[in-house]
Amino acid sequence: MWGFLPIGKQAISSAAGTSGVSSSKSKEAEIKRINKELANIRSKFKGDKALDGYSKKKYVCKLLFIFLLGHDIDFGHMEAVNLLSSNRYTEKQIGYLFISVLVNSNSELIRLINNAIKNDLASRNPTFMGLALHCIASVGSREMAEAFAGEIPKVLVAGYVDTMDSVKQSAALCLLRLYRTSPDLVPMGDWTSRVVHLLNDQHLGVVTAATSLITTLAQKNPEEFKTSVSLAVSRLSRIVTSASTDLQDYTYYFVPAPWLSVKLLRLLQCYPPPDPAVRGRLTECLETILNKAQEPPKSKKVQHSNAKNAVLFEAISLIIHHDSEPNLLVRACNQLGQFLQHRETNLRYLALESMCTLASSEFSHEAVKTHIETVINALKTERDVSVRQRAVDLLYAMCDRSNAPQIVAEMLSYLETADYSIREEIVLKVAILAEKYAVDYTWYVDTILNLIRIAGDYVSEEVWYRVIQIVINRDDVQGYAAKTVFEALQAPACHENLVKVGGYILGEFGNLIAGDPRSSPLIQFHLLHSKFHLCSVPTRALLLSTYIKFVNLFPEVKPTIQDVLRSDSQLRNADVELQQRAVEYLRLSTVASTDILATVLEEMPPFPERESSILAKLKKKKGPSTVTDLEDTKRDRSVDVNGGPEPAPASTSAVSTPSPSADLLGLGAAPPAPTGPPPSSSGSGLLVDVFSDSASVVAPLAPGSEDNFARFVCKNNGVLFENQLLQIGLKSEFRQNLGRMFIFYGNKTSTQFLNFTPTLICSDDLQPNILGFITKPVDPTVEGGAQVQQVVNIECVSDFTEAPVLNIQFRYGGTFQNVSVQLPITLNKFFQPTEMASQDFFQRWKQLSNPQQEVQNIFKAKHPMDTEVTKAKIIGFGSALLEEVDPNPANFVGAGIIHTKTTQIGCLLRLEPNLQAQMYRLTLRTSKEAVSQRLCELLSAQF
Amino acid sequence: MIKAILIFNNHGKPQLSKFYQPYSEDTQQQIIRETFHLVSKRDENVCNFLEGGLLIGGSDNKLIYRHYATLYFVFCVDSSESELGILDLIQVFVETLDKCFENVCELDLIFHVDKVHNILAEMVMGGMVLETNMNEIVTQIDAQNKLEKSETFIFQSPRQDR
C-alpha cells in the first residue's frame, strides 16, 4: 500500500517543470538550476503580463519547494500578499500558504497581511475564515497577537458560528497559539466560561480543540477553569462506557475517540483529585480503562493496540499524578509490569518511562521494586539504546538501601558494554547511588575505583573530586582507600583519573600504609612516578604537589624527591606551571624547617558538607524534572562554583600560613583553578578580577560597542554585539513613550554557558528619566548553539541623554565572562512623525526662534552623500520627512513629536548638504534646549 | 505541543517541513539535518520514540517517527503529547495522503506541496491536533478541490476565449 515508488510519475514531473530541481545530481548543479529557476520566476512576477491563477500558483509552489531545500527566498512576498486579497479561493489559499511557511518579520508586510486577515475574519465565509485563522496560528507573532487576540474569543463563542464547527475548532487552537506567544495580550473574560461549556459540544472535533485550549489556559489560571473538571469527567465517562459504534467516525480501529480521551485525561492532570462526587465517577472511568486493557483485542492491527494503550498510559499518568488511590496505583503498576515483557518495543519503552514516575510514589514504590529482575534483563537484552536508557533511569529511580548493591553492581557490569552516548550519565548515576546508599564506605571507594577502571574517560571531574571529599571527611576509610588505590595503581595500564585520585590520596594518607614493607614510602613514590611521564600537565602538577607532601610525610625520601624536582625535565620544563611548581617546591624543601614544612603541608581539613556536585551535574544533564531527588536549583548552582577540592593539596593550607615562603607558594599553588577568571575578561584591574565571581562588578563597555550603538539610532533590529562566544541580537519596537526590546542571546560555542545573568543598569542620572525593566529572567544555563530571548520593557518618563547599559555575566568552560554593552535606547526612539504643509512648518519654525531652542551643527560627511540613504536615515530616525517644504529641493526637512510620560516635545529639523565641500549643516529646533542638543548629537553622527 | 513535522527520504532530502515555533531559516535546515542524522542511524524494529536533538529543545522533547518505504515521517513534540497518540496521528496523516492522492508516492509530496500542506493544515494547527477523523479531513479536502475546480471553470475558460 505504501509504495512511495517514484517510478511512473515522471510524466507529471516534466509537466510541472520542476524536474531539474528535484533530480539535480550534484550540489553545484542544484544551485545553478535553482538560481536559473529563481531568475525565471522573478522575471515572471516582474513581467508586464498579468499571470493567471494557475501560473501564480505554480510559481509560488516552486518557491516553497526551493525554500524547503534550504535556499533563501528573498522575493515573492509582495505577490503572496496580493494573492491574499483575491476573491478566488485558489489564489487566496496559495497566498496564505506562502505566508505561513515563509514568515517574514518585515513589519510593513505584516500590516498588509493583518489587513487581509481582518477582512477574511469578518467575511463570515467559513472557508476564508479558516484560512485566516490558520495563518494567524502559523505565524503567531506578537504583532498578530496584538491585532487579533481580542477578536478570536468572539469568533470562538459567537452565536453565528453555531453551525460552523470547523471555524470553532480553528478558533480555539488559534487562540491557544496566541496565548502561548503572548499570554499578556489574551484577556480573560466572559468568554472563558463559554469555552468551558464547549466540552459539552456535539462535535467531537470541537471538544478536542477546546480541551487543548482549556488545558493550557488552566495551567496558568486554574481558578478560572475549575468548572472544567466535572465536565471533563462526565464527557470522559460517556466516551469510555459507550459501545465503540456510538461515536461512529471518531472510533479509531474499534477504540472510541482515543485522542479526545487522551486530551481529557491530560486536562484532569492540571488539577488535584476532584470532589468525592465527581471522584467516584472518575475512578469508575479509570477502572474501566484498566479493565479494557485486559480484554482480548478487537483487532490484530497495531493501530488498535496503539490507540487503546495511548488512553491506558494517559490514565496511568493521571493515577500517578493523583497519587491517592493505593488500589489503582498497584493495578497501574501491575499493568506496566505486563508491558515490560510485551513484544512491542514501543510499549516496553513507555512502560519503563511510566514506571519511573510510579517509583517515587510511596504507595507503589515496593510494587515497582518487584520488577527489578525484568528491568535488569531489559538492560542486558534490549536491542534499542533508547529502551536501555529508560531501563537505566528506572533502575536509578527504584534504587533504595535494600537493593542498592545489586543495582550498582548491575549498572557497573552494564557499563562495560554500554553505548558511548549514555556512559557518562550511567557513571554519574552509579556515583550518586553509591554515595547515597553507602553503609560501608569501603564499598563506596571500591565502586568509584571500579568506575574509573571501567569507564575512566567518562568519569568527570565532579566524580573524582567527590570521592576525595568523602575520603578526607571520613577517617574510617582513609587507610582502606590508600591501600586500594595503591593496589589499583599497580595495574600496568591505569587511567589518568586513577592516577589523580591515587596521587591525591597517597599524598594525604600514604603514611597509613607505609608500615607495610610492600608499600614503603619509596615504593609508593616510584609507583606514582612511573606514571608521571604518561600524564597530562594538570595531573603532573598534581603529582608534584603529592611529592612535596611526601617530603613532609616521609623525610627519608626527601633526597630522592629533590633529585626529581631538580632534574632538567622539571626545572626547565616548557610548561610554566610545572616549572614554577618544581622551582618552588624544591626551594621549600631546602629552606623550610621541619616545623614549617609540617604546617604548610599539613593534612587537608575536612570539607564542609555540601550537596553532591555530581547530583548537580546530573540534574543539569537531564533537566531537574527527571532527577527524582529534587532540590533547590539555586543551591545547585552555588555548588558548581565551589564544588570539589582544588587539585593541588598544598594550596589551602599554604595560603593561610605566615611562612616566609608563603607568597612564593601562593603563586605556585594556583593550579588551573576551575573558578579563576580569565585574565582578559575585564580591564578593571587584578583586584577586581579576583572578586568578579561575586557578580557585582560590571565590565567596562565592550570595544566597538560605541559604533554598534550609533548604528541602532536609525534602526531597530540587528546584531548589537558579537565576539567568539556570544552574539546579542535586538528587535525593538516603540510606540508613544513606551518601548519593548527583544534581546536574543546566542551561544556561538558548543559548550554550555552557566550562571548566565544579564542585568540592566541605568545610571543615577538616567534613572528618573527612563524606566527599563527585564520582564523575566532567562534560564541560567544556555546550551551550546542555543539562543535565548529576553524582553525589556521601556518607558520614557522625560527626555534623557545617556543610554542604559546591559551587563551580561556567565561562565564558559571554567572561565568567568563579563560583557557590557550600551542598549540603543535613544531619545529619538520616542519620536512620532508629524506631517505638515510648508506653510505650517515655517510658521512653527519661526515660533521656535529663541536662541536656546535652536542647536546647529556643521560637520564633514563621514559617508557618501546619497540622497536616498539620507532620506531613509531621517525616516529611520523617527521624524516625518517633509517633501516640497524647503524651497531648496536639495535640503531635507523633518518634523515629529517626542513622547515622554510627562510632556510631548515638538521637533523640527533641517539638514542642508553641501556636496562640493562634503559638509552638512544640521539645524534642530525644539521647545527644550536639552532635547535639541541631544537629537542634534544623535543625528549628526549618522551622516 | 507539536513543534515541527518533517518528512524526508532515505537520503535526508527534505520533502516537507512545517515548524510550529519560529526558527530562523538556517536553524530549520540544521534541525532537519540533525533529525535525519538521529533517525536514520536507527535499526528497523526498534521503538518509534527517541529523545529530541539539541536544536529542537533537548531532553524534554521527543522525536516520534515512522518509516514508510523511502520516507521518514517525523513529529517533534514536547512532553505534553501522548507518544502513542502521535504515532497514530502519523498513521492517519499517511492514510489520508493515500486517500487523497490514490496510492501516494514520494513525488506526490514534491509536486503537490500545496495539497500536502493543506491536508496537514486540516489535521494540525499551530502545533495542536485539530482533527483526527479521517472522513472529516477528506471531506474538507474534497470540498476544497471542488471549489478549485469550479473556479477554474468560471475564471479560466472565458480567459482562453479572449
Image: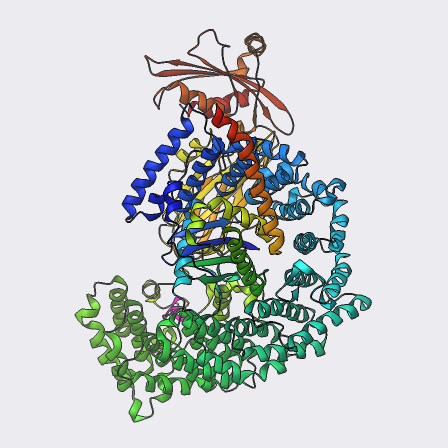
State the quadrant of the C terminus of chain A.
top left
Q: Which region shows up in magenta?
A: A646-655
Q: Does residue A140 show up?
A: no
Name the residue nearer the viewer: A440 or B133. B133
Name the residue nearer the viewer: A249 or A216. A249
Q: Does residue A680 show up?
A: yes
Question: Residue at position x 46%, y 60% from top?
Answer: A2
Corner quadrant of residue A753: bottom left
Q: Is residue A228 above or below residue A439?
A: above
Residue located farthest toward the left when viewing the structure as drawn: A568
Left or right: residue A402 compared with residue A64: right
Question: Residue at position x 37%, y 76% from top?
Answer: A455
Name the residue nearer the viewer: A796 or A10. A10
Corner quadrant of residue A477: bottom left
| B62 in the magenta segment | no
Q: Is residue A119 above or below residue A320?
A: above
Q: Position of residue B32 (x, y in %)?
A: 42, 53
Q: Is residue A877 above or below residue A97?
A: above
Residue located farthest toward the right when viewing the structure as drawn: A277
Question: Residue at position x 22%, y 80% from top?
Answer: A560
Q: Position of residue B58 (x, y in %)?
A: 48, 59
Q: Position of residue A299 (x, y in %)?
A: 60, 71
Q: Position of residue A209 (x, y in %)?
A: 66, 52
